[in-house]
Amino acid sequence: MWIHIVVFVIILAIYAGWKRGWIPKEGIGGKEGMKLFLLVAALGNILGLLLSAGSENGKVYTQGYRLKKEETGAYEQEFLVSVDGEKAGTLYVQIPEKELEESKEPQESRKLTEEEKRQLELKDAIARYNQKKNDPDYYYLPESWDGKRLEWEKPKDTTGALISGLFFLSALLILIMKGREEEVKIQKRYEELLMDYPGLIMKFTLLVQAGMTARKAFEKISLDYKRKKKVRPRFAYDQILSVCYEMDSGVSEMEAYRRFGERCGQVKYKTLATLLIQNLQKGSRHLSDMLEKESVEAWEERKRKARVLGEAAATKLLVPMIMMLLVVMALIMIPAFLSFYGGI
């Protein structure tokens, strides 16, 4: 039972650490991962607790014990038996129809140890005891043997604890997998933001140079994105939509730009947000020039990124190319060797 209490304490400790921020929330799958962990671990532990509580194993019987005979025939059950308070030993009690006839056969096959002889004598005593009882429905375990007191104990069933442990490990595995999914998602979002930034800053620069204010340029970009969002949603443009919604709901333009940079979380987008905030604070006349410079740098950065991705793709292709080369060499060399040695 104590195992289930320990599991519950561990579950609560993990949840409390996650809630207080001691455990990083993004690194282990976020809210969804934690919910699945708590659900699987708690349900598995409750199921194991119910199995452990409903089991009669582990009880000690000092006044003998009786077992119901099964209709399917003979069966065997494990007990821990203690003679006059000595250390309990394991005894497999067989409940067949003819106990005495079957128990004498192993003695002739090999020399038995003292412990095995003692177990056989005890089994014979149990068989004789049941012959005296002559009960067709139950099989009895005596409370004494040759004047010695017997204590019978069912071995503890570890099924409940095993189920709790398996569910807890499964919950941890789910948490780790969700964490990995979260990391992959964050990495994809990071790459997506990098790839979208040059196009976004170019559109924004053109609109500002055409005479629009920063707010109007954001609204124009978000309006164009709304038409394409169902086909291809993009995180950066979703944040631009959020900026427009915030400004429409009463958030100041400066605060909306600051939140935009923080939500995107990349240096490029924070730089753009800083330029827009400085324009509002100081009324810079050179906003379009700074945006154009930022746009050129962004396109150069994207070109470098494209070259790096191309080199990485070429590197990944080396393994399948080498495998194909080995196959081609095998197709050429094997027939040549066969024909050479066959000719000899």
Image: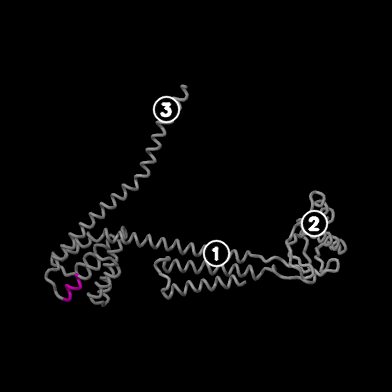
Q: CA distance from mark 2 to mark 3?
A: 70 Å
Helix, strand or loop status at disc 2? loop
Looking at the image, can residue 222 be seen?
Answer: no
**Residue to which mark 1 is pinned:** 167
Q: Please identify, in this view, whether the residue under mark 2 or under mark 3 is nearer the observer.
A: 3
* Distance from the alpha carbon under mark 1 to that under mark 3: 58 Å
> Which residue in the protein does label 2 denote?
96
**Residue 89, x across and y down, in percent:** 74, 64
Based on the displayed image, in which of its 4 quarters is residue 194 positioned?
bottom left
Q: Amino acid at mark 1?
A: Phe
Label 2 neighbour load within 10 Å: few <14, some 14-19, many 20+ = some
Query: Is 106 above or below relative to 16?
Result: above
Q: Is residue 226 visible?
A: yes
- CA gap between label 1 and label 2 equals 38 Å
Q: Which residue is denoted by mark 3 in the rendering?
A: 336
State the residue in front, 251 or 316: 316
Where is residue 86? Give x, y as percent: 76, 68
Can you say which quadrant of the picture contains the N terminus? bottom right
Q: State which tag comes first along the sequence, 1 or 3.
A: 1
Secondary-structure class at tag 3: helix
Q: Is residue 286 left or right of residue 68?
A: left
- Quadrant in which residue 294 is drawn: bottom left
Q: Residue at x 75, y 56 (%)?
A: 72
Residue drawn at (52%, 63%), measured in percent from left and top?
169
Closer-to-camera residue (71/291): 291
- The residue stretch that appears in magenta: 275-281
